[in-house]
Amino acid sequence: MIYHLIAIIVVLIWGCTFVNSKELLLHGMRPEEIFFIRFLMAYVCIWFCSPKKVWSKDWKDELTMALLGITGGSLYFLSENWAVGISYTNNVSFIVCTAPLITTLLGFLFIKDIKATPGLVAGSITALLGTAIVIFNGKFILHLNPLGDLLALVAAISWAVYSLVDKHALAGKSATFITRKVFFYGIITILPVFLVRPWNFPLDGFRQPVIWGNLLFLGVIASFACFFIWSYIIKKIGAISASNYIYINPISTVICSAIVLSEPMTWMAYLGSALILLGVFIANKGKNKG
């Protein structure tokens, strides 16, 4: 149970990062700039507590690490943040929160020992319904934006692939080494974006407490600590079980928004949060570890 509790704490922290990122965006930072700084900080932190070997044992392992850095790093964060800029926030939030469902579906298709159980299906549907209620706040108005919604779907699929590949990559390897490689390849694969969109945020802007304070939280807590812990959690309870906790993400987002941004909590948010918790409980009671 301790691993499930830790997984919940990590996801609750990740839910708060939407508020941190929003604060940074409002103060002039671009999504790729935020991502680069937070992953660079995380990489520096983890270098001091991970094995000092530079490369994996063979090129296949190294390609796997690169895939993790792309799917759990640059591709996920850029597609999610660009989607927010193009499409409606509600659409993006809901689509990204389908990542656990996509993880389960991909697990069924590509991992032989994962099978659908009534509890897993019922729990996933209940949690997804709760997510919809929290995000849309009882005012479901569907606004389609093909490009933005497609980018949000790319983010959800990207995280699902990351979760499943991370489980496979961890076999016999150090979680700190793998997490360090994720940060490294996340940084490397974001650099080409700056060729198209050169760095814009002024260096003297980092003197502002709101900037370095939020970046410290994103880099040291949400990236360095949480990514390492998440890899360890996947190793212990499996990718499917861990991914189901992503449904909890919107709960901490709305709570943190209410505290920091003074966005009110409604009774619909409470109802949706209760359904999410119930759905996650049912799904993990009827899950097949994978």
Image: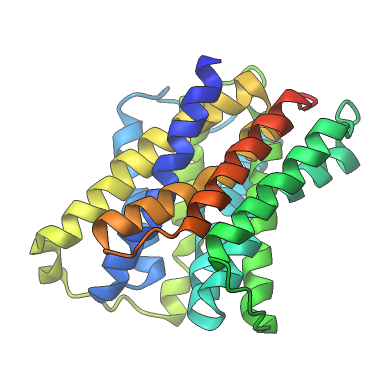
Q: Residue drawn at (36%, 79%), measured in percent from left and top? A: 198
| Image quadrant where residue 61 sits | top right
Q: Nearer the viewer, residue 41 or 258?
A: 258
Q: Is residue 41 visible?
A: no
Q: Is 143 on the left-hand or right-hand side of 217?
A: right
Q: Nearer the viewer, residue 25 or 250?
A: 250
Q: Is residue 147 visible?
A: yes
Q: Position of residue 259 (x, y in %)?
A: 27, 54
- Give above or below for 81 relative to 145: above
Q: Position of residue 168 (x, y in %)?
A: 71, 30
Quarter of the picture containing the N terminus is top right
Q: Residue drawn at (34%, 66%), measured in percent from left and top? A: 22
Q: Residue drawn at (88%, 25%), measured in percent from left and top? A: 113
Q: Position of residue 25 (x, y in %)?
A: 31, 71
Q: Is 112 on the left-hand or right-hand side of 225?
A: right
Quarter of the picture containing the C terminus is top right
Q: Position of residue 117 (x, y in %)?
A: 87, 31
Q: Is 55 on the left-hand or right-hand side of 95?
A: left
Q: Residue drawn at (50%, 60%), measured in percent from left and top? A: 77
| Image quadrant where residue 50 sits | top left
- Give above or below for 223 relative to 35: above
